[in-house]
Image (cartoon, rainbow, N blue to C red):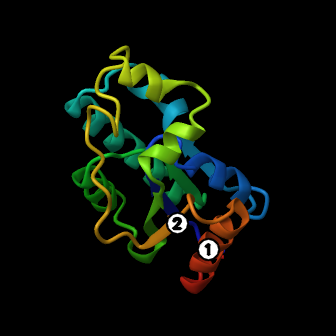
Amino acid sequence: MKPFILWMTGLPCSGKTTIVKDLQKDIPNLAMLDGDELREWFSPKDFSKAGRDEHNKKVAHLAKLLLNHGVPSVVSLVSPYIENRENAREIISAGDQFAEVYVKCSLAKCEERDVKGMYAKARKGEIKGFTGIDDPYEAPEKADLVIDTEHEPLADSANKVKDFLNERNLL
């Protein structure tokens, strides 16, 4: 197995972290760089455009460090702007060992899945700059892989990722 980085992007509650946790059952030593956890350490509470850009760059550098040490990693991060994801690809510069994975799910379905009530708070104005509500999410135009978590079960989503990694000779 070669080290790799999957950069999973999608709306909050689209299923990014859930897919990674399922992948960790089958892929030894798979590191998950979860956006919610990393924000606590790297960029607490700065959801401005500049703050999001900086947070994404920090995560990209951390992912590159893991790649350079041979650790396969999945970044589970909203990364709402196309330029964030392009910057990550450029920072990491790993060719076929880097892939952008779009975890596609409608806003309505993400709101339905939201156990923390973040979307409801954003709609009430209690959370400002929430992606999908009052801050945009720019869906990838050329993702390396698209996973439709709204219309397929978790096992199918995880299997698509594993098939993709096998096709790239990374597993």
Among the 4 quarters of the image, the one containing residue 48:
top left
Q: Residue at x 31, y 72 (%)?
A: 142
In the displayed structure, 92 sits above or below 33; it is below
Residue 147: mark:
2
Task: Give the image quarter of residue 90.
Answer: bottom left
Which tag, 1 or 2, sits closer to the chain's start? 2
Instruction: Say few, some or many: other residues with alpha carbon within 10 Å of mark 2 (under 14 / 14 to 19 / 20 or more).
Output: many
- Quarter of the image with the N terminus in it: bottom right
Q: Position of residue 7 (x, y in %)?
A: 45, 57
The spot of residue 131 in percent (x, y) is 34, 37
- At mark 2, the secondary structure is strand
Quadrant for the C terminus, please.
bottom right
Any part of residue 77 in sight: no
149 relative to 10 in the view: left or right: right
Q: Is residue 114 left or right of residue 8?
A: right
Q: Amino acid at mark 1?
A: Lys
Task: Using the image as rendered, state which of residue 115 and residue 94 is in the foreground.
Answer: 115
Please state which amino acid type lies under the numbered disc 2.
Ile
- Say what secondary structure mark 1 lies in: helix
CA–CA distance in space, label 1 to label 2: 7 Å
Identify which residue is drawn at 56% across, 39% down.
Answer: 112
Q: Nearer the viewer, residue 90 or 77?
A: 77
Q: Which residue: 32% across, 34% down? A: 133
Determine the residue located farthest toward the top in the rendered image: 126
Residue 16: tell me if it is visible. yes
Report the residue marked by disc 1. Answer: 160
